[in-house]
Amino acid sequence: HAELHRGRPASLSIASPHLGRLPVVGRERYLLSGARTAATADDIRAAAMSANLRVSISESAQISTEPLLPCRMLLEFDAPDDSRRIAETLGIGRSHVPPAWTLACFSQGLTEFEASFEWHPRNGSFRGVEVYDPSRLAFIEGLEMPDGPFLCRSIGDPSLMFAVNGDQEARIDDPDFGRHWALAQTSVAAILHDRRKRLVAVPTAAPLPRILARALCLCSGHVPSVLVGDRRKGLRDYLVFAEVPAEVADKVTQKLGVGFVPQTINTLEHAQP
């Protein structure tokens, strides 16, 4: 719906209205994203009436603490061409190919991410840094240096993150991709997948890169729910994405270079941390 730029000063860019198809086989379901007003639903109904089309509109509030997040607006049409005619009548964009699939396909993967590294000889010692431990999904001070490639960051300035390979290092500008690069180096699978229920659970300690997270959100139009782990058992917190088709889920794992952990999500409390 919008892009928040956290610079100084911060700014907010509102997307143009757009109809994006949900990845549901045999149904013409579309999400309305971008700018809207309180009269948007009435405007859509009026446009459908003038074009002699039938459209079902449902609105549902998002469960989120984000005050700028609008309600989820879902439109369902009888025929594939009806959504095009509505979009043309309203003068808004439309994607018949589900944006969830498009984003998952065209997002960069770990191969492209690593190819962007600008390696140079490492300067100085490893004092003053925390090393990323893939098994704990955390940066640990005083951790023994791994033998293979690894991720580290400055204790004084955590935004300074580096990939290290032997005596070479490269600055990491995307910390989310950086964490998943580190997981791939040790083949640690941290994301859970309930294929039957079409749920994907991502540890909050290792969030997905932005474009891949958006791809999973656009499978349903819902923001991910938060599943809080039992601290007494040392269990992790997860973001749970709903209605994710297997094809989109598999494409995400392909981009990250590590497969999912098959897991029944409603027994997540029994999963290992």
Image (tube, rainbow, N blue to C red):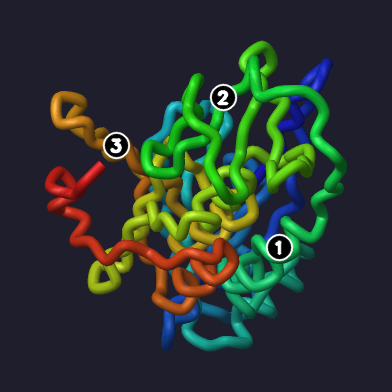
Residue under circle 2? 130
Q: Say which label, 1 or 3, has the lower sequence index.
A: 1
Is residue 250 something that shows in the picture?
A: yes
Q: Which of marks 2 and 3 is nearer the N terminus?
A: 2
State the residue at coordinates (23%, 61%).
263
Amino acid type at image mark 1: Gln
In-front residue for pair 259/164: 164
Quick one: SS at disc 2?
Answer: strand
Give coordinates of residue 34: x percent, y percent. 67, 49
| Residue under label 3 | 236
In the drawing, what numbered circle is on residue 123? none
- Number of marks drawn: 3
Pick the residue in front: 113 or 29. 113
Question: In the image, what residue type sits under mark 3?
Answer: Arg
The local crowd at label 1, few if under 14, some if 14 to 19, many if 20 or more residues have their Cα within 10 Å, is some
Which percent across, then down, holds residue 26? Answer: 42, 88
Looking at this view, name the residue that lies furthest to the top.
Answer: 156
Q: Residue at x 80, y 34 (%)?
A: 122
Query: Residue at image x 70%, y 65%?
Result: 111
Do the numbered discs 2 and 1 sit on residues whose CB atoms are within 8 Å?
Answer: no
Circle 1 SS class: loop
Q: Quadrant of the C terminus?
A: top left
Give the x, y percent position of residue 58. Answer: 41, 58
The image quarter in which residue 135 lies:
top left
Residue drawn at the location 21% of the way across and 31% of the way down: 234
Disc ID at residue 108? 1
